[in-house]
Image (cartoon, rainbow, N blue to C red):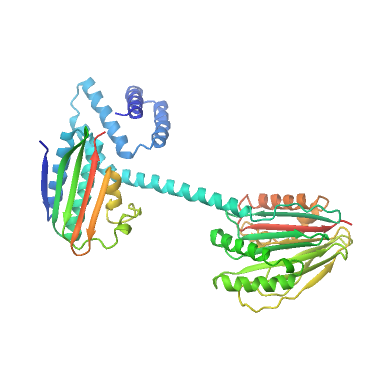
Amino acid sequence: MEDTKLTMYHLYKEMLNNYLKSKSEHTLYSAQQFSKEMLEKDMSPEEVISLHKSVIQELQQMNNEAVTDFIDSFDILLEVMIGYGLAHREHLSLRDRQRQLESELTVAARMQQSLLPSGKIELNSVDFGVISVPAGKMSGDYYHYFIDEQGHIGAAVADVIGKGVPAAMCMSMIKYAIDSLPEQRLQPAALLENLNRVVARNIDDDMFITMIYGSYDPKAHRFHYSSAGHEPCLFYCAESDTFRELKTKGLVLGVSSKVRYEEYYQDLEPGDFIVLLSDGVTECRIEDEFIDIKQITQLLRKYKHLPAQLMVDQVFSELEKIQDFKLNDDFTLLILRRNV
Amino acid sequence: MQVQTHVDINSEWGIVAARQAGRKLAREIGFGSVDQARITTAISELARNIYLYANKGQIHIEELTDSGRRGIKILAIDDGPGIKDVRRVMEDGFTTSGGLGAGLPGVKRLMDDFKIDSEVNSGTKITVIKWLR
C-alpha cells in the first residue's frame, strides 16, 4: 500500500473503532471531515469501500466473530461503486479541462485589457474619466480615446451585441480598424463611415456593433459626435443643473457597407460634461427591472463634485452594489468635462 | 509459465465467463480487491461491446511480466463492422449520462495501457494492460 493509503487506512480504522465503541456524534463529525480529505486525495468511491472492507476484516479477526457474509457483501457494493468511480474520474478530468480553459481565458482577458488605451489625459482644460468592467472575463465593450498635439480629444464607446469570447474577438477588430484611420480621428461621421465599411466586410451577418464617437475641440469648447445605433450620450448643463439626452440617428455598424452618418455638436460651458455609456449601464437591473435613466443621472449628480475618474468609479461601485454584485452585461462609462 | 485464457464471446454467458477468468487471474497475480473489480469491469465492457456490436469474438487474458513488473493483459478481438470514427468513440464524453455503460473511455481509465485498432467492415482489436503496483 502507498504511504497515503496506509495513513488513510490507519485513520479510518481508528475512527471506525471509536465509533463502534462509543457511537458518538463526535466521531461522525470526524468522519465528515475525513471525507473531505479523501476527496482531496482523489480517492475514488470504490477505494473507500475497499478501505472499509479491509478494516472490517481486521476487526473481525480480532473479535473472532463469524461475520464473513457481512464482509463478503462488500464485494457487491464494490462492484456497484465502480460506476461511481468512473463518474468520479470523469469529473476530475472535466475539472482539469475546465481549469485549463479558465486559465486560457484569463490570459486572453489580459491581452484584451492591453488593447485598451492606457495613457492618462492630463489637461487643464478637460477632466476625463473612464471605467469599463466586463460581465464575464472577456468584454464586448470597447472604449477608445486619444489626444493630438493641439489638445483635441477623440473618444468613443462601442458595444458588440453579444458577450464573451466572440464579442471580444470582434472588439479587437474595432481597435485595429480605428488605429488604421488616423486622419479621421477627429471627424466622428467620417470615422464611423470608414469603420462601418471595415465591419461590414469582416463580420458575420448576425453580429452587430453599436458605437458612439465624439471629438472635443478645447479652443471652441465644442463636442462633435456621431452615433451608429448606440445609446444616446448624456449632456450635463452646469448652469441649470440638468441632464439631457443627446439624440442621434445612425444605423448600427456592419449592416450595410454604404451608410452615411450625421454629425452633431454640443457646446460646453465650464462645468458642463458629456457622458458616453454602453447599454450595460442603462440596462442595469434591480430585481428584474431595468433601472431608469433618472437613477443614473441622480448618481452622476451625486458625485459631480468629484474628478471625472472618481465619478465613474463611484457610479459603477454604487450600481454594482444595488445589483448585488452581479453584472448582467459589460459596463462602460466615460465622462469628459470642460474645466475652464 | 505464463497463464493464458481464451473465452469465446457469443452470449451473455461468455461475458460472465470472461469476467470470471479475468478476476481469477487478477487475484493470482496479486491485484487487490479494488483492482480486481476494475479489471473485471473493463473485461465486462469489452466483452459486452463485442456481443452488442459484432455478435461474436474472443477475449484473451494473459499474465505479463516486463522487467520485474507483473501485470495483466486483455485482448478483445472481433471481426464485426468496426468503428468508423475511433477518435469520436474515445472522446471524453459523459458516460454517466449515456446508456452504453462505461464505454471505451471508461475502460481506458480503469486500465494503464489502452490500444485500439479498428477497420470498417473487418473488425476491431483492443488491447488493454494493467500493471501491478
- Horizontal placement of A318 versus A54: left or right? right
Q: Residue at x 18, y 56 (%)?
A: B50
- Horizontal placement of A146 versus A286: left or right? right
Quarter the N terminus of chain A occupies: top left
- Horizontal placement of A325 versus A234: left or right? left
Position of residue A84 measured from the top left corner of the image (x, y, whole percent): 32, 45
Q: Nearer the viewer, residue A154 or B48?
A: A154
Residue B39 in view in this figure: yes
- Horizontal placement of A94 versus B72: left or right? right
Residue A27 in which image quadrant:
top left
Q: Nearer the viewer, residue B57 or B36?
A: B57
Position of residue A272 measured from the top left corner of the image (x, y, whole percent): 85, 60
Residue A77 in which image quadrant:
top left
Q: Residue at x 34, y 27 (%)?
A: A3
Residue A197 in which image quadrant:
bottom right
Position of residue B49 measured from the top left corner of the image (x, y, whole percent): 21, 55
Q: Residue at x 40, y 31 (%)?
A: A34
Q: Total label count?
A: 0
Q: Nearer the viewer, residue B38 or A295?
A: B38
Quarter the C terminus of chain A occupies: bottom right
Residue B13 in view in this figure: no
Position of residue A323 measured from the top left corner of the image (x, y, whole percent): 64, 53
